[in-house]
Amino acid sequence: MAKAKFERTKPHVNVGTIGHVDHGKTTLTAAITKVMSDKGLATYISYDQVAKASEKQGRRDETKILTIATSHVEYQSANRHYAHVDCPGHADYVKNMITGAAQMDGAILVVSAADGPMPQTREHILLARQ
């Protein structure tokens, strides 16, 4: 059986979430897919799926998962198709963040309102600009 040919009908944009560990990057990514799925423009990807939760990934407690690798989700708007990269924020996984950022056309900087800018916030901004 032949595969159906994929035809892009909208401009494509690569975006990503960057910022300090535990500031809400994965939560925001999952929320975007939920909102877009409610509009029929994406498939909902849960927090655990975006975080690629598993025992070896590093579940720190009941609610927090240590994101180690970049995750990719897709959604679209009326005008564009988006490939979204959720980057890890932990200092030990900056190499993985760089790999994800290299593909980005733009980034969403996530900063906790409670904590404000933290060490990896500045580092991620500098890496994203390169």
Image: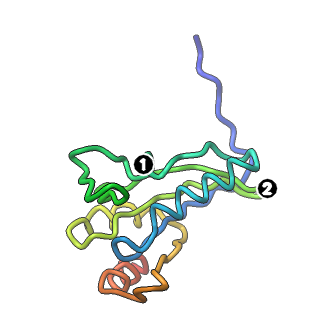
x, y percentage for residue 90?
A: 27, 70
Check disc 2 and report the residue beneath it.
78
Q: Is residue 123 left or right of residue 7?
A: left
Q: Please determine whether, in this image, residue 113 is positioned above or below residue 60.
A: below
Q: Please determine whether, in this image, residue 49 is positioned above or below residue 1.
A: below
Residue at mark 1 to residue at mark 2: CA–CA distance: 27 Å
x, y percentage for residue 99?
A: 34, 61
Give amino acid for label 1: Asp
Front-most of residues 15 and 86: 86
Give amino acid for label 2: Ala
Question: Quadrant of residue 26 in the image?
Answer: bottom left
| For marks 1 and 2 on the same chain, the one whose residue lies earlier in the sequence | 1
Front-most of residues 47 and 110: 47
Question: Quadrant of residue 7 in the image?
Answer: top right
At horizontal 36% and vertical 76% (from top left) the residue drawn is 20
Residue extending farthest to the right is 78
What kind of element bears circle 2?
A: loop
Check disc 1 and report the residue beneath it.
48
At horizontal 54% and vertical 71% (from top left) the residue drawn is 106
Of the two numbered discs 1 and 2 in the rendering, the one whose residue sits closer to the viewer: 1
> Within 10 angstroms of label 1, few (less than 14), some, or many (20 or more) residues?
some
Quarter the C terminus occupies: bottom left
